[in-house]
Image (spheres, coloured by chain):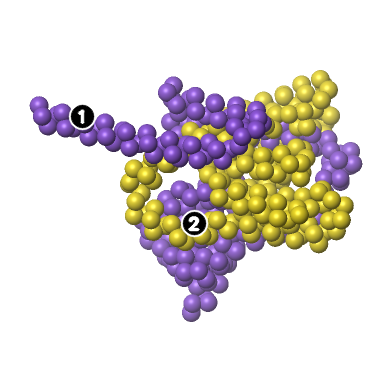
Amino acid sequence: MIYLKLIWSYLKIGLFGFGGGYAMLALIEREIVGPGWITEQMFTDIVAISQMTPGPIGINSATYIGYVAPGESSATFSNPIFGILGSLVCTLVVVLPSFFLTTYTSHFITKHKESALVKGVFTGLRPVVVGLIASAAMLLMNSANFGAVSYDIIASIIICIAAFCVVFFTKIHPILVIVLAGVAGLFIF
Amino acid sequence: MMNNICFQLFITFFKIGAFTFGGGWAMISIIEKEIVDKHHWLAKDEFLDQLAVAQSLPGILAVNISVAVGDRLKGMKGSVSAALGTILPSFLIILTIAIFLTPDLIKNNEILSKIFKGIRPGVVALIIAPVITSAKAAKIGWKTVAIPIVVALLIWSKLPVVSNPILYIVLGGIGGYFWYRRQLERTRELKGKEVEK
């Protein structure tokens, strides 16, 4: 049953999603793209759409993936009703751990924020989070996103490097970078 | 009166959810303005305590902070109102997009497929940038640089078991705890020696 699998995956994503949206992408990649519920391209498109719409990437991707995955998994679920149900399920499940953890542990963390346990755990998580974000970027550098023929690959690499330079060295908003990359795509491909 | 605060929490977080682009960190400063400066629901240091909790926990930062603030003000009802406010705008916007901008439409429409072919490598660039900024923030140096590299390569390898990100989150937490405890013991030993002198 696709819904049960989605619930299980999103519980894991909500429960182990340390380090913010980008680090969470590594988990989503493994849980959702890995089993083939959505394609690599759809995953990248969701990230792009999340960046261009308000709200956290974790919610945006849960809503989108929940809508698309049932239809992709089997033709019986191609009716939009099943998609809306999937959206609801994924979005609720991904925030569920937040509810319980925040309500029941906030007292403990506030009280022990200077303790070896709390400080040590978060010191240890920091370099791991950097690795998670790097792995998300590396996993997305594939033929689904950069093309399979040499012209596409070279053009994609140029767009990627140019976009990186703009994001990293200027204060231009990421939304504008995505728009510009789209316009470039329209003329190059 | 109680319902009134819950409703206000919902409306406040709904506005934040609907108008903030860029996720967690962009939202925090606006949440702080609304909660601390405008509505005076929490004092600044109280808010910072809640933020520390929200940051420490897994999950979506904006949801964590809205649950923490809502819970602090009105318990369970408050946290549900605040979290719903944060989630609902994203949910409705993305659902609308998902219904109309289907993967088949992107694939089969020539103009859309060209636009997305350009967008995809651009998105990858947007994820490379935070690798560097987060490495700086985590103060990654020569001693610790191996950790993110090994973690990234193993996850990327897609090998069974070792490519599971959860493994490294658990190991990082446990390892961090023992490392920190050893650091504390060392500083204690050093202090002890100084006292002997």
Dividing the image into 4 quarters, which one contains the C terminus of chain B?
Answer: top left
Q: CA distance from mark 1 to mark 2?
A: 38 Å
Q: Position of residue A73 (x, y in %)?
A: 81, 49
Q: Specify the subunit that label 1 lies on.
A: B
Determine the colour of chain B. Answer: purple
What residue is at 65 percent from the left and 49 percent from the top? Answer: A9
Task: Say if B134 sits above or below B72 in the image.
Answer: above
- Residue A101, labelled with which disc? 2
What residue is at 53 percent from the left and 60 percent from the top? Answer: A99
Crowd class of label 2 (few under 14; some 14 to 19; many from 20; radius 10 Å):
some
B18 and B138: which one is in front?
B138
Q: Position of residue B18 (x, y in %)?
A: 63, 58
Label 2 SS: helix
Q: Position of residue B115 (x, y in %)?
A: 80, 37
The reply to whether dot 1 and dot 2 touch (C-beta < 8 Å) is no
Amino acid type assigned to the residue bearing label 2 in the image: Leu
Q: Are marks 1 and 2 on the same chain?
A: no
Task: Say if A151 sits above or below B19 in the image.
Answer: above
Q: Position of residue A185 (x, y in %)?
A: 79, 32
- Residue A182, labelled with which disc? none
Which chain is in yellow here? A
* Residue indicated by mark 1: B190
